[in-house]
Structures are given as C-alpha cells and as structure tokens.
Image: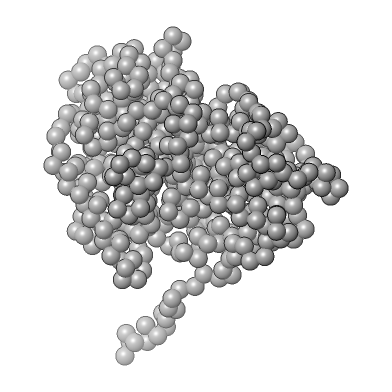
C-alpha cells in the first residue's frame, strides 16, 4: 500500500496547443444541426480535468465533435497542479496536486498497464521510482529513532486488514469502518510510533482516518490498483519530476481539441436542466445551451453551494453526493539554503499527536533534485483543514518546531527561504483533494452518484469509480465510460434506461427501537 494518489489542478497561463488529429473518424455536420436547433453545443463538458478530456476524446472517436469543454482555470488539467518553487536560480517545478502514477502494470508478471502510465510514457513525462518501504528514516520526540520492527508489523497488519475485508465480502457481512476492522484483527495503536506507522500505511493513502473510511472499500483501493492477484496493475509507483509539470501527460493528450471546443477562465454559476436540455450560466453572465451536460466537477464542489442547480437536484442524487467523503491531502514545500536532513527519500516522524506532520520527503536527493534544498511534509484530513486556517508563517513555525525536535543536537538549522502549499479544502474549484468511501456509503449510493438526471445531466470523475475512487486512473476510466455511453445515446437518438437510479436507499432490515426497548423491559 502506498501513498498519495492526490489528484490534480493547474497553474500558469499556458494555453493548450490545438489541432484535430487526422487519425480520428470524421463526424456528421454537427455544427449545421446545432445551428438549426439554436443551441451552442450538443454536449457541454463541465471541467477540463482528466475525466473531462478523456470523455471529449472518446466522443470524438465516436464521431461526435459538437461539444465544448468549460474550464474555470486558465489551463486544462483539473486537479493536476504544478508550480515553480524556490529562489531565483534555484527554482524547481513541484507538484502541489497529483504527483504519482500508482500501480504501473504492463510488465512481466504484472497486471494490465495503467492508462495513466501509458500516457506518461507516450509523452515522455520524466518520472522516478518511489521507494516507500525500503528507503526510510525514522524520528520521534527524542530525535532519530528506530521503530522498524513496528513498521514491518503494521505493513503486515494492513495486508491482513484487506484480506479480512475480502472474507467479509464473501460472507455477505455488512461493511463497517476500517478502525473496526483493525480492532477485529487486534491492531490497536497506542504509542506514538504505532500511530505514526498506522498513519503512514493508511491515512497517507486515503487522506482520512480509519474511523472515517470503509473497511471493505479501502481494501478495494489497495487490491484493484496494487495487487496483481486481485486484478490490480502492480505495486510499483512512479513520482513525476518533469519540469514541464505532471499535467503534461493530459495536456498533450488534449491537443486533438480545436480552439472552439475549449473555453478557459469560465466559471460555472448556475446549471438549469429539464428533459429538453441544459443551460449553463457562467459568473460573467454568459449563457450556454446544449442537449446534454457532462459534469466532471470534484465531489467536493458537488457537495458545496458554489454551483446552483435549477431545479434543485433530486433528493436521491443529493443524498448520494453528500454521503461520500472528500479527503484533503496537503504537501507543504520548504526550500533551505542547504540540505541538513536525512539522506533517505522519506522520513516518518512519530509525534504524540496523531497526524502532526508525520511524513517528510526529500527532493534534495540523488533520485530527484539534488542541490535544490527542497523538502516537503504531508498532512491530511482534519489536520489539513486546520492548517488552512493558519498563515504561511504560522505553518512554517510549526514545521520548524518539528525539525528541531527531529534534530535536537543540531543548533544551526536555518530558516527556510521559501514555503508553499495549496489550500485545497478552501479552494472553491476543488473543495478538497480526492474522494474517499465511508462505511455508511452503500452500493446504491454509488450507483446514484453516477446516475443521470432527466437523461440530460451526466456525471463523471474519480469519485464515480467504484474500483479506483480517488485515483487518477479512476478519472480516466470514468471519462472513457461516460463518453462511450453518452455517444451511444446521441447516436441512437435517446438515452432510455441509461444509468438508472434508486429512488431510495434502504436497510436490509428495519430498525426496531421500540420493540428492542420493550423486550428489555420484560
């Protein structure tokens, strides 16, 4: 199990080169039919991240080119987000959003190739293999420490947790939290070392705690991506160090788009829909009409009120949206005049407070950016939300306190010259980093999350993937599937019985509180 599937945003004002690939099939004259209907497009794709772009590519391959991607930012890429960081002359491109291809696959003895890895190789994005379990330094509140025995034990315990979840599925037992699962296999962390290692093997991946996470679904997150025997790609991971930015793989893939098919700097304010079509109103007052809208907003955006729906979404859709969780994963970069820290790729810090700056990664490493003086710490979940309320200077002070604790005998630790982190939870275009599946989220909820509304509103994104929620490749698969299904509807003249929903999600057995209390009184 490895870390940080953290997903995806954008940064500079570079516009995407646009030429329609000659190898793509010719479409009917959609522009003529569009003008005759008086609409702006057949499909409005709301959001230009991985799902939106792959859906657009799939529609094009099916002969449908009358679509427009509406992207709020100044470039395509979604939650892929790179920035130039550091002092002039020492700057490097770092990823404040997604950084890893997780589960490579495609090799001998491995599963199928991860489609993100296919695109990374296709466009020559530079990556390095990450060593999550063999290149680690350890610290606690006394300084350097060795709790590798606990680390090995908890790595094994996580595997046991996923195996036990599989047995629960086979017996058709109800889901519960991963914390319950840990308890049932008698894993109950108490010491700072145990809490830090559990965080490393669980929270660092899901961006939420075992208490907040489904026991069964968290095992899917591991098995379907990393476990070849379960159909996953492979346990390998690659970290992007490409100075063009990790977003390059999807922006290059988007070069088939023509200029009129993309609208950047376009923030959606209101979505009006009916059985006849969709009208999207932007914050600048522009109105766009289409037969269909494919919504690829993050789960966090769907959960907030940044976009207004007219009429309001039906209760079954709203319940599904609100029932899933949005995790926050925050990388905090600092640049120092020179390196003074561990020579490994990663360090685990065991604090008495669980989740307090527990994972540190060195980019001033032979495998990444030697001489850069850059290191970053990661926090997730509630701790991410906490630090977003602080100033950069306050966060820096806390980080420096931890570094002084890690190196108590070092009296000349300098102050950093630069600090950088993104406030994902408060960003109105993301409202978090990526989705997580809680124990109270039923299969019917997930079906409703993907279901269409009035056959005109379609939904896609990593949160719509049952196997790969929270992963980049989940966004890729959902974009492909939505594009294929929507194309079938358009080419077939209608969308009857596509992505149907459950009007209500019910328990297998009803609660009987009165009967229970009456029984106790007898």
Q: Nearer the viewer, residue 25 or 357?
A: 25
Question: Can you say whether 478 is above or below 380 in the image?
Answer: below
Judging depth in this view, the residue of 60 and 3 nearest the camera is: 60
Q: Is residue 142 left or right of residue 491?
A: left
**Residue 438 point in image, percent of width and height:** 41, 57
Residue 235 appears in the figure: no
In terms of image quadrants, where is residue 140?
Answer: top left
Query: Residue 306 location in percent, x, y?
Result: 63, 45
- For this orientation, the residue located farthest to the bottom is 522
Q: Name the quadrant of the C terminus.
A: bottom left
Q: Residue at x 77, y 58 (%)?
A: 276
The quarter of the image holding the N terminus is top left
Asked which colour scheme the image uses, the reply is one colour
User: Which residue is at 45% across, 61% downward?
Assistant: 441
Number of numbered discs on residues: 0
State whether residue 273 appears in this view: yes
Task: Choose between 464 and 359: the one closer to the eye.
Answer: 464
**Percent x, y for residue 207?**
39, 44
Q: In the image, is 183 to the left or to the right of 466?
A: left
Decide which of 193, 233 is in the foreground and name it. 233
Q: Given the current orientation, which residue lies at the most extreme top position?
A: 89
Q: Residue at x 61, y 55 (%)?
A: 485
Q: Left or right? Give the position of 501 relative to 397.
A: right
Residue at point 32% right, 54% down? 230
When asked about the image quadrant of residue 403, the answer is top left
Classify 164 as above or below 82.
below
Residue 243, relative to residue 281: is it above or below? above
Position of residue 309 measured from the top left corner of the image (x, y, whole percent) = 68, 53
């Amino acid at each position: 199990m490895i870390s940080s599937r953290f997903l995806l945003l954008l940064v500079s004002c570079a516009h995407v080169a646009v030429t329609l690939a000659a190898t793509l099939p010719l479409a009917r004259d959609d522009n003529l039919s569009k003008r005759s209907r008086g609409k702006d497009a057949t499909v409005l794709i709301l959001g230009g991240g991985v799902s939106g772009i792959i859906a657009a590519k799939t529609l094009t391959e099916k002969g449908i080119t009358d679509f427009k991607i509406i992207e709020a930012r100044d470039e395509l890429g979604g939650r892929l987000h790179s920035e130039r960081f550091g002092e002039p002359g020492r700057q490097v491109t770092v990823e404040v959003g997604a950084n890893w291809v997780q589960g490579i696959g495609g090799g001998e003895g491995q599963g199928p190739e991860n489609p993100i890895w296919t695109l990374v190789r296709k466009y020559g994005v530079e990556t390095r293999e990450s060593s999550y379990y063999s290149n680690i330094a350890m610290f606690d509140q006394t300084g350097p420490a060795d709790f590798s025995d606990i680390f090995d034990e908890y790595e094994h315990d996580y595997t046991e947790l996923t195996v036990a979840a599989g047995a629960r599925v086979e017996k058709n037992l109800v889901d519960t939290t991963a914390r319950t699962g840990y308890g049932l296999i008698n894993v109950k962390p108490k010491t700072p070392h145990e809490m830090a290692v559990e965080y490393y093997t669980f929270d660092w991946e899901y961006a939420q705690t075992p208490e907040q996470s489904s026991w069964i679904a968290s095992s899917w997150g591991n098995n379907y991506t990393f476990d070849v025997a379960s159909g996953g790609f492979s346990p390998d991971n690659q970290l992007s160090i490409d100075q063009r930015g990790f977003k390059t793989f999807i922006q290059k893939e988007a070069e088939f788009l023509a200029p009129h098919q993309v609208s950047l700097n376009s923030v959606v304010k209101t979505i009006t829909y009916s059985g006849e079509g969709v009208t999207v109103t932007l914050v600048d007052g522009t109105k766009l009409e289409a037969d269909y809208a494919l919504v690829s907003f993050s789960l966090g955006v769907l959960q907030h009120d940044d976009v207004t729906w007219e009429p309001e979404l039906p209760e079954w859709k709203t319940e599904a949206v609100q029932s899933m969780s949005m995790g926050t994963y925050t990388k905090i970069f600092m640049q120092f005049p020179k390196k003074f820290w561990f020579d490994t790729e990663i360090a685990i810090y065991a604090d008495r407070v669980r989740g307090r700056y527990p994972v540190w990664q060195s980019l001033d490493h032979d495998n990444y950016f030697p001489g850069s003086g850059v290191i970053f710490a990661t926090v997730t979940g509630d701790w991410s939300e906490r630090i977003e309320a602080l100033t950069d200077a306050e966060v820096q002070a806390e980080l420096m306190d931890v570094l002084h604790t890690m190196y108590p005998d070092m009296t000349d630790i300098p102050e950093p010259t630069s600090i950088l982190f993104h406030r994902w939870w408060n960003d109105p275009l993301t409202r978090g980093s990526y989705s997580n599946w809680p124990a109270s989220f039923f299969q019917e909820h997930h079906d409703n999350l993907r279901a269409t509304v009035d056959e005109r509103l379609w939904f896609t994104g990593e949160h719509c993937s049952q196997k790969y929620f929270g992963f980049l490749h989940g966004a890729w698969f959902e974009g492909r599937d939505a594009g294929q299904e929507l194309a079938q509807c358009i080419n077939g003249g209608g969308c009857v019985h596509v992505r149907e929903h459950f009007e209500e999600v019910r328990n297998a057995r009803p609660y009987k509180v009165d009967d229970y209390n009456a029984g106790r009184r007898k």
